[in-house]
Image (cartoon, rainbow, N blue to C red):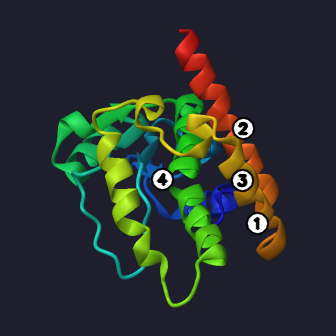
């Protein structure tokens, strides 16, 4: 369901619920206010900061869940996680920021793997990159992104960057500006961190 459909669905189910039944939505980028006209003080949000896919087991308690609105939302979040340390209050503005960050760290990572597959030589599959990605994620548990960053943009290796761009322009032209923009972003934040 698209986020924009929430008010329509809320309007459809509201007449079938008694006033004391709490109702939550789970969207990161939708304000609590969309439910309030239908459910008043019983409206809430339970936002699990996780990616869900059909056929994949959900490991509640291994990720954070954010709540807003009725206290029942906090209770449900804690019941789902079985770990109160993973449950936090987040108002609609905070959740929106968390959601944008989640798009960068999850959705864009999938897109980056798709891009990597576009330049991957046969007979290899994306599995050749999985140990590298796991190591990066492991490092981020103890290092900042700046400290964990490696690669040609981090090193200021213009010769390698130019070689990479030439390859992309030849075999996957739509990826060249993305590569260039990401490399520039890395250079910028590394430069800023060295000044601070």
Badge 2, how many Cα within 10 Å: few under 14, some, many 20+?
Answer: some
**SS for callout 2:** helix
Judging by the rendered image, the residue that carries numbered circle 1 is 168
Q: Is residue 48 above or below residue 150?
A: below
Distance of label 4 from label 3 (alpha carbons): 33 Å
Q: Residue at x 40, y 30 (%)?
A: 144
**SS for callout 4:** loop
Judging by the rendered image, the residue that carries numbered circle 2 is 184
Circles 4 and 3: CB atoms closer than 8 Å: no
Badge 1, how many Cα within 10 Å: few under 14, some, many 20+?
Answer: some
User: Which of these two is toward me, 190 or 160?
Assistant: 160
Q: Residue at x 68, y 62 (%)?
A: 5
Distance of label 1 from label 3 (alpha carbons): 8 Å
Which badge, 4 or 3, comes first in the chain's sequence?
Answer: 4
Residue at the limit of the structure toward the top, as seen here: 196
158 relative to 186 in the view: left or right: right
Which badge, 2 or 1, comes first in the chain's sequence?
Answer: 1
**SS for callout 1:** helix
**Does residue 32 appear in this view?**
no
Judging by the rendered image, the residue that carries numbered circle 3 is 179
Task: Determine which quarter of the picture holds residue 1.
Answer: bottom right
Badge 4, how many Cα within 10 Å: few under 14, some, many 20+?
Answer: some
Circles 4 and 1: CB atoms closer than 8 Å: no
User: Which of these two is toward me, 38 or 63?
Assistant: 63
184 relative to 78 in the view: left or right: right
**SS for callout 3:** helix
Circles 1 and 3: CB atoms closer than 8 Å: yes
On residue 26, which mark appears?
4
Q: Residue at x 31, y 38 (%)?
A: 74
On residue 131, which mark appears?
none
User: Which of these two is toward me, 190 or 163?
Assistant: 163
């Amino acid at each position: 369901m698209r986020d924009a459909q929430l008010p329509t669905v809320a309007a459809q189910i509201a007449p079938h619920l008694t006033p004391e039944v709490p109702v939550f939505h789970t969207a990161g980028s939708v304000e609590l206010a969309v439910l309030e006209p239908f459910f008043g003080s019983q409206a809430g949000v339970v936002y699990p900061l996780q990616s869900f896919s059909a056929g994949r087991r959900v490991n509640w308690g291994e990720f954070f869940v954010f709540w807003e609105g009725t206290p029942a939302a906090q209770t449900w979040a804690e019941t789902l996680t079985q770990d109160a340390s993973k449950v936090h209050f987040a108002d609609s503005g905070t959740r929106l920021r968390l959601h944008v960050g989640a798009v960068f760290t999850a959705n864009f990572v999938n897109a980056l793997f798709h891009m990597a597959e576009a330049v991957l030589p046969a007979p290899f599959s994306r599995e050749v990159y999985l140990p590298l990605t796991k190591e990066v994620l492991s490092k981020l548990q103890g290092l900042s992104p700046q400290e964990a960053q490696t690669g040609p943009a981090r090193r200021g290796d213009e010769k390698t960057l130019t070689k990479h761009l030439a390859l992309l322009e030849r075999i996957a032209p739509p990826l060249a500006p993305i590569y260039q923009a990401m490399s520039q972003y890395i250079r910028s934040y590394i430069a800023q961190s060295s000044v601070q």
